[in-house]
């Protein structure tokens, strides 16, 4: 272990020296290859606009096509040194053949086949990445489109933007079926990244790769209406596209998908709008698929293809979820990295078929083990119900006590008419909470692609609220302070006969508790991935019934409920929840790459630990210990404070 730690910096220096000398050429190679692929794709898809039935259909379109032929040949000759000689000759032959077909007014099908063949070879020879490393976010894509594309293409993509009206040729109508059905997200990505020569479509190097992928996927949704019935769309997606990968969705056009899956327009709409809840599972599935294909290639003696596929298994299957896995099980991630490196060495070293097969099997075993680590067991309905009850019972009891004080003062003053305003106030506050919950649920569903980041933000905000409001204000003679405050306010209000003031007081007293409850319940809901919403609602209903029952008993029989004891128990529960949410919140930020990860390999991974927000990283444990220390301090302080 010591030798390994000492040698690691030397290996880092070695690789920095190697890659620093190659980084620039690799970047140039990728960019040049991307421009060439983009040009070839444009030739294949736009050729029908200039030529039909062996004759020129549109002179300007055909002349533009000849210009692209010249550009493709130019890019090829400029980049001949970027590929190995065999690939250079093959790519050159395909591009020259495509050029001759276009000059000979060849049939559309022949030109498109030739263009596709050349594109495949350029991508293979250059190792060009043709798919995003994570599922694109359509909401972010819409925002990128509005900021960068709408001024020319129009808000809805009809090519009617104010600046676009001044351009010649006019911006493309992104609803035009014949052209758009031939484009894949990869083709749109290249257009946004590289621009189109001779048009107003400029390149956008200022956008990040994620932003370009987001807008590329968004553009292909513009021709479709979104179906918001998630149950129906999920079933159609599962039945129509059971084994489709993100790579296939990215590189295939709507026309190709229609042919491959017998998909109609409604099916394509579901596919293009798909924002999966299970992106992690999809990456794992992709990794396993590449490993299986690598096994087949190695058995056929094609070690070069097998090595490429095993590399893709890591780059497109494991690397996108590396942060999640490293923060959940750092020891497993280290073993998986080492094993997949050994597999590539076995393939590049042309070891025996038995050795290669064993290495691939071990890689697959570790990938399956990794899937169990990152795909956490969903929150059970019973746990969601109990957590919802514990939160609502605390907040509901306090709201009820304050409303009781208000009503008691009103009765003592001999007034009866203001009662309906008090009831109206707390009823409106509860309805406002329901609306907040519905909006929050829609927000969770629409941002499932960023669920880890949302979970982290909400969890940490909830921790702050739990500590500051749930303990400091509630525990510090909260009931007596509220009594004094309410008594003063009600006397002033009744003195001036301000019925609106009574309504407002009742509303804000209850809404304060409702707001806290919705925040904490949202944290539970997002932790469950939005799948335990019904259980949470059931918990809320049960808690509401309990609070109403206790209120009835108190009002009917004037029984003295052990309110301080109830508050003390609920404070312990909320303290435990604060510690749990602190761990889960920091873990979520680690999963999204916003916080560093320092794994503790000696700490075993267990689902029971994760249930309590305990993960084997330095950052999560420090955060939980800090919150636990604050909770213990506050609890001791509360114990020394007499609650009236």
Image (spheres, grey):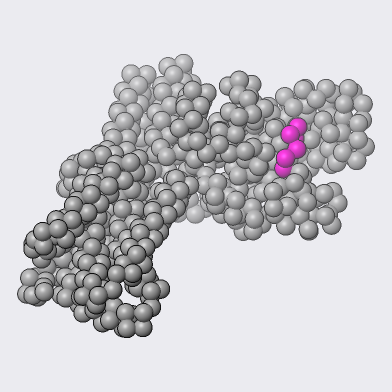
Residue 268 screen position, x and y as percent: 60, 31
451 left or right of 274? left
Residue 47's x, y, as percent? 81, 32
Residue drawn at point x = 38 percent, y = 50 percent: 452
- For residue 292, side relative to residue 644 (left or right): right
Q: Is residue 285 magenta?
A: no
As for residue 177 lying within the magenta part, the answer is yes
> Which of the pair 23/400 is nearer the observer?
400
Q: Nearer the viewer, residue 588 or 236?
A: 236
Residue at the image position 49 percent from the left and 23 percent from the top:
239
Residue at the image point whose x is 65% and y is 42% from the top: 222
Quarter of the image for residue 176 reads: top right
| Nearer to us in this view, 418 or 16 | 418
The one of 247 and 512 positioned closer to us in this rendering: 512
Quadrant holding the C terminus: bottom left
**Residue 282, visible in the rendered structure:** yes
Percent x, y for residue 126?
A: 59, 38
Image spot of residue 191 (x, y percent): 69, 45
Residue 347 to residue 4: above or below: above
- Residue drawn where x is 75% and y is 32% of the image: 178
Is 433 on the left-hand or right-hand side of 137?
Answer: left
* Region rendered in magenta: 174-179
């Amino acid at each position: 272990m010591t030798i390994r730690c000492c040698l690691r910096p030397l290996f880092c220096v070695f690789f920095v020296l190697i890659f620093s000398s190659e980084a620039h050429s690799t970047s140039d190679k990728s960019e040049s290859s991307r421009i060439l692929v983009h040009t070839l794709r444009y030739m294949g898809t736009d050729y029908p606009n200039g030529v039909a039935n062996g004759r020129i259909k549109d002179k300007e379109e055909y002349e533009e096509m000849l210009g692209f032929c010249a550009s493709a040949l130019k890019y090829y000759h400029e980049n001949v040194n970027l590929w190995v000689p065999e690939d250079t000759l093959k790519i050159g032959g395909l591009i020259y053949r495509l050029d001759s077909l276009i000059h000979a007014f060849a049939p559309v099908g022949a030109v498109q086949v030739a263009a596709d063949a050349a594109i495949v070879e350029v991508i293979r020879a250059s190792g060009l990445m043709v798919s995003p490393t994570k599922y694109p976010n359509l909401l972010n894509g819409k925002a990128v489109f509005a900021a960068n594309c709408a001024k020319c293409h129009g808000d809805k993509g009809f090519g009617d933007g104010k600046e676009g009206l001044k351009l010649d040729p006019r911006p493309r109508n992104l609803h035009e079926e014949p052209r758009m059905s031939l484009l894949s997200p990869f083709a749109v990505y290249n257009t946004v990244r590289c621009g189109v020569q001779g048009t107003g479509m400029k390149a956008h190097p200022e956008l990040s790769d994620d932003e370009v992928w987001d807008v590329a996927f968004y553009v292909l949704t513009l021709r479709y209406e979104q179906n918001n019935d998630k149950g129906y769309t999920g079933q159609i997606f599962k039945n129509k596209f059971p084994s489709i990968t993100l790579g296939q969705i990215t590189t295939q056009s709507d026309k190709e998908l229609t042919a491959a899956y017998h998909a109609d327009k409604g099916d394509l709409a579901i596919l293009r709008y798909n924002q999966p809840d299970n992106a992690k599972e999809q990456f794992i599935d992709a990794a396993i698929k590449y490993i299986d294909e690598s096994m087949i290639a190695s058995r056929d003696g094609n070690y070069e293809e097998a090595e490429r596929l095993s590399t893709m298994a890591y780059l497109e299957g494991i690397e996108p979820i590396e942060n999640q896995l490293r923060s959940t099980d750092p020891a497993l991630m280290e073993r998986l990295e080492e094993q997949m490196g050994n597999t590539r060495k076995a393939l590049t070293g042309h070891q025996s078929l038995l050795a290669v097969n064993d290495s691939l099997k071990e890689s697959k075993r570790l990938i399956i083990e990794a899937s169990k680590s990152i795909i956490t067991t969903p929150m059970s309905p019973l746990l969601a119900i109990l957590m919802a009850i514990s939160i609502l019972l605390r907040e509901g009891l306090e709201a009820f006590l304050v409303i009781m004080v208000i009503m008691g003062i009103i009765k003592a003053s001999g007034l009866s008419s203001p009662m309906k305003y008090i009831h109206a106030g707390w009823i409106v506050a509860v309805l406002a909470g329901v609306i907040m919950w519905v909006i929050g649920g829609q927000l969770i569903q629409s941002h499932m692609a960023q669920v880890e980041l949302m979970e982290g933000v909400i969890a940490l905000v909830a921790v702050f609220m739990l500590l500051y409001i749930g303990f400091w204000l509630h525990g510090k003679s909260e009931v007596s302070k509220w009594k004094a405050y309410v008594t003063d306010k009600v006397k002033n209000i009744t003195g001036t006969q301000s019925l609106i003031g009574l309504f407002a007081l009742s509303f804000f007293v209850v809404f304060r508790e409702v707001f806290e409850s919705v925040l904490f319940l949202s944290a539970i809901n997002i932790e469950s991935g939005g799948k335990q919403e019904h259980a949470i609602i059931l918990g809320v209903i049960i808690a509401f019934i309990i609070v109403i029952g206790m209120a009835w008993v108190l009002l009917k029989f004037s029984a003295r409920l052990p309110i301080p004891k109830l508050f003390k128990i609920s404070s312990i529960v909320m303290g435990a929840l604060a510690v749990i949410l602190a761990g889960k919140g920091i873990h979520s930020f680690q999963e999204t790459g916003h916080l560093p990860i320092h794994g503790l390999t000696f700490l075993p991974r267990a689902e029971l630990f994760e249930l309590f927000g305990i993960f084997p990283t330095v950052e999560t444990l420090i955060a939980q210990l800090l919150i636990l220390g604050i909770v213990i301090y506050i609890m001791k302080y509360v114990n020394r404070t007499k609650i009236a």
